[in-house]
């Protein structure tokens, strides 16, 4: 239960962060936004590593997959933030949260234990996403084509996140969880810096926070991302990884509810029903995973 509670706390942080991203991604260049998110988390993890002295040791394979994982992390956030900027959040976020069942499939292909209940969970999740992408006949400002694009961007983010997490798991087997995570963030930050330098070299204009309010939102988003990550790791350590994953998988509902409260974005009973359906499928996939 401890792991679940920490996972729920992390879901609250990341769900709120994604709601903030709905605003910041529309007003700040993506490379600038990613730099802020990766920069703060890298600084926080560097402080942690310095305090514990557990710096990542050299291992060619682990460092390689960590580098790929870090770059995939950037791509995943780009797709997710683009989907959130388009909206509606109640379509983008559940689609992105399907990464957990995709990760089950990747691990099964890699030879990890797989049970038939997980196939049911995968079908449940993708059925829910397909229904979320349908237009409500009443009160929906977007047509079906628009919703499909948002859902596909969210699914794209989920696919990339699943690959990124699998590679991070590979690195963690050799280096340890925190060490693999630290390398992931270092390489992701290096990738963002390269993007910014390339943009500056081509004279491409970057949109920085135009007001103090937007700058505060970007800082808040970065802080919430870091707190979410910390909560998930603590839950995995003091509780259990499966419990923390179950709690964390609920972030899609948190994002939609936060957008409803803060941004006034309507959810609707039908979309709320299918959001619940997706959450149940994700939880079922995790619960049915072999120990």
Image (cartoon, rainbow, N blue to C red):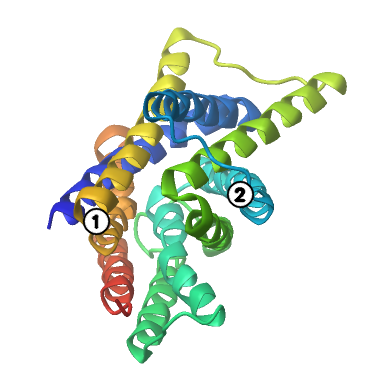
Q: Is residue 140 left or right of residue 152?
A: left
Q: Residue 71, relative to residue 263: is it above or below? A: below
Circle number at residue 247: 1
Quadrant of the image for the C terminus? Answer: bottom left
Q: Looking at this view, is 77 or 169 the one in front?
A: 169
Residue in view at x 31 percent, y 51 percent: 251
- Residue 64, x across and y down, in percent: 68, 51
- Residue 63, x across and y down, in percent: 64, 48
Labels 2, 1: front one: 2
Q: Secondary structure at mark 1?
A: helix
Residue 150 seen anywhere in this rendered image of the structure: no
Q: Which residue is mark 2?
A: 66
Quadrant of the image for the N terminus? Answer: bottom left
Q: Is residue 85 left or right of residue 97?
A: right
Residue in view at x 41 percent, y 65 percent: 100
Q: Is residue 169 left or right of residue 1?
A: right
């Amino acid at each position: 239960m401890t792991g679940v509670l920490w996972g729920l706390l992390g879901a609250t942080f990341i769900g709120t962060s994604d709601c903030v991203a709905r605003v910041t991604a529309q007003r700040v260049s993506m490379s600038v936004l990613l730099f802020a998110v990766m920069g703060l988390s890298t600084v926080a993890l560097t402080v942690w590593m310095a305090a514990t002295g557990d710096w990542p040791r050299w291992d060619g394979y682990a460092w390689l997959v960590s580098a790929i994982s870090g770059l995939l992390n950037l791509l995943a956030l780009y797709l997710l933030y683009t989907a959130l900027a388009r909206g509606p959040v109640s379509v983008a976020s559940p689609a992105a949260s399907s990464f957990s069942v995709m990760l089950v499939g990747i691990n099964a292909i890699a030879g990890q234990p797989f049970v038939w209940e997980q196939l049911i969970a995968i079908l449940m999740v993708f059925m829910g996403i397909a229904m979320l992408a349908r237009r409500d006949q009443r009160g929906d400002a977007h047509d079906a084509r628009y919703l499909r694009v948002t859902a596909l961007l969210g699914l794209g983010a989920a696919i990339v996140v699943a690959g990124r997490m699998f590679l991070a798991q590979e690195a963690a087997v050799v280096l340890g969880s925190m060490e693999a995570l630290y390398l992931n963030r270092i390489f992701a930050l290096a990738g963002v810096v390269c993007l910014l330098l390339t943009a500056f070299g081509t004279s491409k204009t970057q949109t920085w926070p135009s007001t103090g309010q937007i700058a505060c939102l970007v800082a808040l988003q970065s802080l919430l991302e870091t707190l979410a990550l910390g909560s998930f790791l603590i839950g995995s350590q003091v509780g259990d990884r499966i419990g923390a994953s179950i709690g964390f998988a609920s972030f899609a509902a948190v994002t939609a509810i936060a957008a409803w409260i803060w941004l006034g974005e309507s959810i609707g009973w039908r979309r709320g029903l299918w959001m619940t359906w997706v959450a149940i499928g994700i939880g079922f996939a995790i619960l049915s995973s072999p120990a």
